[in-house]
Amino acid sequence: MSLAATVSEKANLIWAIADKLTGVFKPHQYGEVILPLTVIRRFDSVLEPGKQAVLDACKQYADSPLLDKLLEKASGYAFYNTSPFTFARLLDAPADLEANFRAYCNAFSPNVRQILERFKPFWPHLATMSEKNVLYMVLKEFTTSKADLHPDKVSNLEMGYIFEELIRRFSEAHNEDAGQHYTPREVIELMVNLLFTHDSAALSGASVTKSIYDPACGTGGMLSVAQEHIHSLNSRASLVLCGQELNDETFAICKADMLIKGNEADFIKSGNTLSDDQFAGQQFDYILSNPPFGREWKNEKAAVEREAKQVDGRFSAGLPSISDSQMLFLQTAVARLKPEGRAAIIQNGSPLFTGDAGSGPSEIRRFILENDFLDAIIALPNDIFYNTGIATYIWVLSKAKSASRRGKVQLINANGLFEKRRKSLGNKRNDIPPAAIAEICQLYGDFAESNISKIFDVADFGYTKITVERPAESEAAPESADKSEQREAPAPAALVPYAAPSCVPDTAPKKRGRKPGGGRKPRKADASRRDTENVPLKEDIQDYFKREVLPFAPDAWIDESKSRVGYEIPFTRYFYEYTPPRPAAELAVEIRELEMELAGHLANLFGE
């Protein structure tokens, strides 16, 4: 049976167990029961072969100070359970089922008990299940061969898929935001392949150890796929998986999965990454993440602003809108990368262009671009996520670009590289097939231009926003034309001074002895006649001013104290393809055909 078939079959069987809860719980509560039971059943199945050895060791070494380590050795894992019960044996005493089940759960090793405690709604639900006489039926369903989660029947890889599929289904069933916990596997595979495209040599050898971090790790899917990929390149390589997750249930599932796989589960941390960073001061070889889109950071505002004031703080470059925290995660990725590190992080379209020169988002882009951290941006197809159909992008960051990529940014438009799904899953109507993943990674690895791949200098995304002042009408010189009628002015900028860019040409405004408008300086600027211009960084400001402003406003001058450098990445504009309108004659024929067809339908309807 294929991987997809196994995952689908097991997920369907576990999903069906929720039918036993009908009438006792509301549909939105089903996941609060079934998900923790799935985790417990998985632990139970994994520990089954060493069960008797653990019970024997518990008796033999009861007074030993090393009991914990001896029990781990007996179980064969970094966890154990000292209860004589298993899921199957619990059913032998139906009258005492709730008490025995709680005793069974309390007999797990401390690290597992800490995980189970995160499923907070489950424990009161357990009493309700017992009271309503459904606990026995539900546990019995979990002990049948159809729902067997033994490692011989369900691999760790498959179990990870099953956890994620169940979360998606339960969340979708009551319109929760499943996408904040679940990223489609083909998207993760694309990100991982991009991340390791240039690192095959670095991952070879017998004693390779790399670290990877996800600041919004969910159930740990990205970390697991990265580990699988590295092991496919070098089975002897070691990968330290680190992550932080805010949601209690997904954190518990991630930590349980890591524990069962033999990874260091203590490196999976609980808490809010933005306000309670559990990895402060640490840096990693790789970072992978799909942080939430459009999630406000109002609750974290005080902590974020406090860190933004620190010179070495994650957010010192700037702050995005309070309504969207994703650029805070982008800055977290930059801050947590080692000097030779690489990252792949998903963002929606707004971080590309929102915010005028001097604003928080523009300052964040400026920091990333001028330090030459941005390696590539890949536009993904629409409708590939479960909770949104909007445009999404992978930002590939690197702190140690190869010589050929220094000062450059590659944009790849993979928007058309998808295949339609036979059946939609929420908003997910499209998949990225393996061939498309290979094509994208080939374009990225070759660093070559094509119809969907373009390469730019960092300075191509920068501009200086200048403020053009003019005197009152009574003092104004004669004009050949009114430029304000010909071109629309951008919005005013925030007032934030800047040093010259570090990796782009120094085209910031220079102090001049006289104003460029010619003649004497006017006594006072008329605010109602103020205008702004965005001058590309690669262009001389005075040349631009003489060409684009003075012919239309000879009495104008630049207020250099208000000039600001900004950055934006107008991705769509670079790949826009003009489609000419259809000929009028062709449209007329089509309209006539539709009119005749409509007339025929009306005649049939009214019997004319």
Image: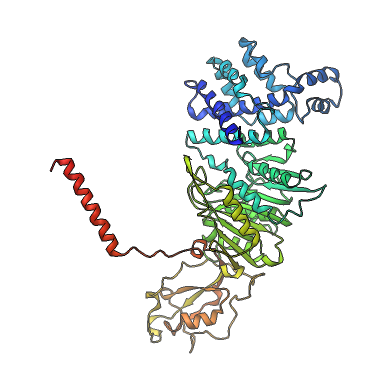
Quadrant holding the C terminus? top left
Q: How many circles with numbers are drawn on the protein?
A: 0
Is the residue 590 above or below the residue 81 in the image? below
Position in image of residue 465 (x %, y %): 52, 71
Position in image of residue 323 (x %, y %): 51, 51
Left/right placement of residue 308 relative to residue 605 reads: right
Residue 394 appears in the picture as rendered: yes
Residue at 52% x, 16% y is 132
Residue 318 appears in the picture as rendered: no
Along the viewing direction, whichever of 252 and 596 lies nearer the viewer: 596
Residue at 65% x, 25% y is 41
Left/right placement of residue 409 relative to residue 201 reads: left
Quadrant holding the N terminus? top right
Residue at 75% x, 22% y is 49
Residue 607: which quarter of the image? top left
Residue 243: which quarter of the image? top right
Residue at 52% x, 56% y is 350
Left/right placement of residue 150 relative to residue 130 reads: right
Position in image of residue 39 (x %, y %): 64, 28
Asked which colour scheme the image uses, the reply is rainbow
Position in image of residue 176 (x %, y %): 50, 37
Along the viewing direction, whichever of 471 and 75 lies nearer the viewer: 75
Q: Residue furthest left?
A: 608
Is the residue 28 above or below the residue 460 in the image? above
